[in-house]
Image: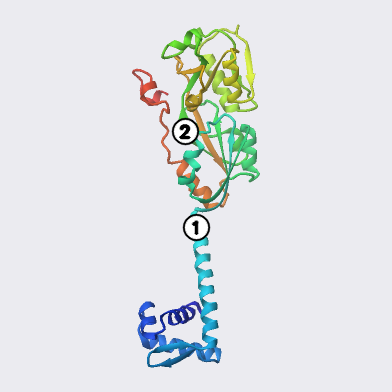
Amino acid sequence: MDLRALECVVAVAEEGSISRAAARLHMTQPPLTVRLRSLERELGVELLVRHGRGVDLTAAGRVLAERAHRVLADVSAAAEEVRTVGLGTRGRFGVVVGHTVSPRLLPHLAGGAALGGGVDLTVTEATDADVVERVHRRDAHAGLLHLAPGEPGRTRHPRARSRGLEVAVVAREPLVAVLPDTHPEAGGDRVDLSLVRGARVVVAEATGEGFAAHVRAAWAVAEADGGHGLVEAGSIVQAMALVEAGAGVTLLPAQYTSMVWGGLVARPPRQHTPVVETAVCWRPDEDSPVLRRFLRTALSTPEPDVLGPAHARHGLGAAHW
């Protein structure tokens, strides 16, 4: 007794006619009759009572039709589940995000439209170092973190490489200066970092080492003198809160511009600073269809100047960012 035989029994039971059941099964009546009689011989019981108006099921036939209906439904559900798991539209997916990566990025990469409603998504935050370690330990399928500034085309992270992880850039953005709206430099379109007075509010290197390296490089480009103190914050939000309280000025990735609250302004720096690269890291031996689907989305995203044309440097193309 195979699935095709069960389909035949269900069709005859629901149609009440061998001819109509044959048409429904896209076959002719004689082969269906042969199949049903062969099944009766296999089971040793009659399944159908034939009469001029069609056929009726015997008591044994009704039991078989009921069980066959359930079996076929289970097989169909199993096939659909296997298909969706294989395509990456069903399953579990964990991603760990560095503390300095903008929360606006992940929804574009792993939102409902990107992964599908059948995927259970778990998102956690960690330091850059922990992002790498959690992916390495398989505590998460993928991680997002900021890369330190480097040579053009650099897409590798030393710690990730030492753990055998793959690393690829998924977004690029410039830095912006965030300062109180009462600051003397707040009124212009751009901020000259060399003229900014007061402390530099920085995010702790232990929190986001890749981003912290960008900030150090940006202040160095500004050739600011060393007479300004540093105020270390444990997160991006803390840095903005310290700026609001008058502790100084901070530099943030541009994706945070829309998250700057009242009393603060975000301005592009007048000095050229390296773009901040956000990268995804993952284990190359991770066998997860959901991860493969996530990576197809993440690695196909454009990498523009996220501030848009209104903030582009005059006379310079996007490649100069």
Amino acid, disc 2: Ala
Estimate the x, y position of residue 236 in percent, counting from the top left.
Answer: 58, 25
Quarter holding the C terminus is top left
How is the model colour-coded? Answer: rainbow
Q: Which residue is mark 2?
A: 171
The residue lying toward the viewer, choosing from 154 and 190, is: 190
The residue that appears at 48% across and 46% down in the rendered structure is 112
User: Residue 318 or 203: which is nearer the viewer?
Assistant: 203
Label 1 belongs to which residue? 84
Q: Which residue is at 51% across, 85% downward?
A: 61
Q: Which mark is residue 256?
A: none
Q: CA distance from mark 2 to mark 1?
A: 29 Å
Q: Position of residue 296 (x, y in %)?
A: 46, 45
Residue 161's x, y, as percent? 59, 37
Instruction: Answer yes or no: is residue 162 visible.
Output: no
Q: Position of residue 83 (x, y in %)?
A: 49, 60
- Residue found at the far left of this picture: 315
Compared with 311, 61 (above or below) is below
